[in-house]
Amino acid sequence: MVEENMRRKLIVGNWKMHGSRDQVSQLLGDIESGSERLLKDVEICVCPTYLHLGLAFDLLASKSGVGKGQIKLGAQNVHVEAAGAFTGEVSAHMLSEYGVSYVIVGHSERRQIFAESNQFVAEKFMAAQASRLTPILCVGESLDQRQDDETERVVLNQLDAVITVAGIAAMKEAVIAYEPVWAIGTGKTASPAQAQQVHRTLREHLDRLDPAIAKGMRIIYGGSVKAANAKELFSQPDIDGGLVGGASLEAEEFISICKSADQESCKL
Ligand code: PEP
């Protein structure tokens, strides 16, 4: 039996390909000042574009220090190799030099638009860890797969693809994001019960492989999370925070989502 909620909530803002230098400065500043009012039971991470990581790094460093304050930096992608002739790519070590703590791997937009395979995602997962970055492994089913009752098979297959390559012990320093593809950027959210069921399935699967890892694993939910639905989602026993796209681009909305997570953490 998996014990519930020994885990600190994590809220990750995925800014995708949005923002000018001015907008990034403003948004980060507003999130920083808004988050000062939060308790320390929630961890916050923002993922700007590669191009804006340096700016975000400087802004955070001028305050509390990158990685030391409440707001962590994350990257939206990473390449599998450490260096070399890979035009347009960025390595995990380069990210680590900019204070990056987390890297999103296996996001459905990268799987679908950039044809990233399970194997490639597993290699990215390991490349991130080799530079001491924590991978946020995204898994999730399409609408057709859900309608065909394939959700469990799909998400466990995506998870197992990484475990097979990286080993179960590697999951100790990782986060899983359950992101039903049909809920990303669509305004449709999985109901708290639907999301909880998949999170529980993922945790039970890990529990069969390594109970301690299952217990400590943060499994966050992504898919049209907003202030209005965050509290109910985060109150589910196996939902340990959120991966937030659109709603992370508005400071007030994002802070309100973080507050919902903080309040839920406080209850434990
Ligand atoms: C995402 O980008 O991972 C995401 C969940 O986006 P949105 O919150 O906009 O659905």
Image (cartoon, rainbow, N blue to C red):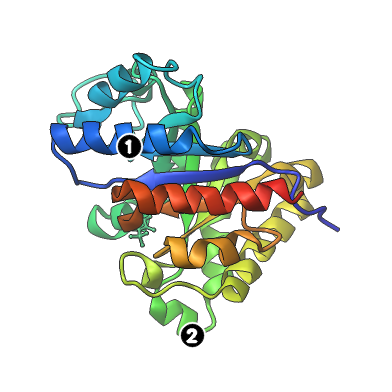
Apparent side of residue 206 relative to residue 176 in the rendered image (left or right): right
- Label 1, secondary structure: give it: helix
Residue at image position (48%, 27%) is 133
Q: Is mark 2 within 8 Å of ligand 1?
A: no
Apparent side of residue 140 relative to residue 87 in the rendered image (left or right): right
* Image coordinates for residue 182, horizontal then vertical, percent: 38, 73
Residue type highlighted by circle 2: Asp
Q: Residue furthest right?
A: 1
Report the Cα–Cα distance between label 1 and label 2. 43 Å
Q: Front-most of 9 and 110?
A: 9
Query: Would you name the residue on which mark 1 appears?
Result: 30
**To which quarter of the image does residue 28 belong?**
top left
Q: Earlier in the sequence, mark 1 or mark 2?
A: 1
Ligand 1 quadrant? bottom left
Apparent side of residue 179 relative to residue 196 in the rendered image (left or right): left
Total residue callouts: 2
Look at the image and tell me whether residue 241 can be seen. no
Quarter placement of the N terminus: bottom right
Q: Any mark on residue 148, and which? A: 2
* Image coordinates for residue 209, horizontal then vertical, percent: 75, 49
Residue at image position (44%, 44%) is 12
- Label 2, secondary structure: give it: loop
Q: Any mark on residue 90, and which? A: none
Q: Residue furthest bottom?
A: 147
Disc 2 crowd, CA 10 A, few/some/many (<14, 14-19, 20+) = few
* Image coordinates for residue 266, horizontal then vertical, percent: 70, 46
**To which quarter of the image does residue 7 belong?**
top right
